[in-house]
Amino acid sequence: MKRRKFLTSVSMLAAASVGESPLLYGGEGAYQPLIPVVDTHQHLVDVERFGRDWSHPPVPGNYGVKAYKEAIKGLNVVKAVYMEVAVPPYKRLDEARYAMELCGDKSGPTVGAVISADLYMDDFRGYMSQFRNSSCIKGIRAGFKSRESLTDSRILDNIRFLGDMDMRFDFIVPSAWFPDMVKLIRACDGTQFQADHCANADPKAFFDHDKLHSKPDHDRDEWIDGITALASEKNVVCKISGLVSRLSGYPVTVENLAPAIHHCLDIFGADRVMFASDWPWCLRGTTLSGWVNLLKEVVKNRSLEDQGKLFHDNAIRHYKI
């Protein structure tokens, strides 16, 4: 979306914010999607096309392009970045080709992709080099076999190579690994990193003790210290996503989500956070529209400029889309 059109949307939102204008609020206080949205974490699991051994969606169903278009109706999602869906290793190249096909289909919102690759493979550089001239492939997401891998010179060289190709690296690691992840990021300062799912935050870690009936996945203070260290490295951005999938047994509410989200927004700052749907994995907690509206409610008191950065501007700049 062109800048002029976005500014027009923000101007409308500003005008609507005086009182509770229908331009800002819909039925039962739900926000109207005036700010254009870039979804930086769009999973598509089209098992009707690729078969049941392609990937395993979190809830039964088929989650291809048609279903995604239905899920984003009325949300003003103008662009999306496809995220790999853990296909079997021998199908990773097929998935990359599928992602490029999506980017070439101008009838859909997908304009970029983060694919899967094995950091441990012998010919990592050769595998990734085939995507060097692709305007679609924006980077990879890969896992680490152990905490010790974060200081492995071969792994560091491969991640540095991503930076040489202007590609990004998405990561999810336990909070206990954050100190070593910071060292890796610092050693690969020419590569851009994306901390997925609010840096793997568990929203239950921020509950009052009397509200808990299950143990959080991490200690609150350990996570805050770790994410503060991650955010001190300027080549890291944070995707605001994943939280609604981790509240099994608890209400998916603004009250339960807000603390973790605000920590991410405050620690990383307005210029280094990006909205991500994590659809269809978000369906463990709520619909895609439900997640968007919950997040808009959480950030409603932040400036319109910062809301625009979160939902649109930062992704446009970061992914060059």
Image (spheres, rainbow, N blue to C red):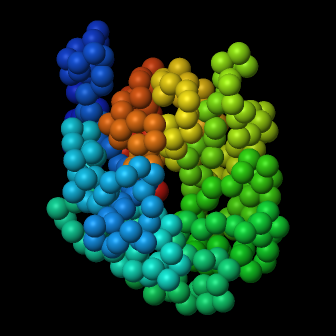
Does residue 3 appear left or right of residue 132 in this picture? Answer: left
218 with respect to 170 (left or right): right
Instruction: State the residue in front, 250 or 82.
Output: 250
Q: Which quarter of the rendered picture does the C terminus lie within?
A: bottom left
Which residue is at 53% across, 86% downward?
127
- Identify whether 60 is placed above or below 11: below
Task: Tell me if I can see residue 111 in this picture.
Answer: no
Residue 187, image x, y percentages = 75, 67
Q: Residue at x 36, y 60 (%)?
A: 44
- Place of residue 60 in the rendered image (x, y in percent of width and height, measured from the top left): 37, 52
Rendered location of residue 110, percent (x, y): 30, 61
Q: What residue appears at the point 37 percent right and 45 percent down from the top-left corner?
A: 312
Q: Residue at x 17, y 62 (%)?
A: 107
Q: Quadrant of residue 151?
A: bottom right
Quarter location, residue 74: top left
Residue closest to the eye, 41 or 87: 87
Task: Check the image and name the residue furthest to the left.
Answer: 107
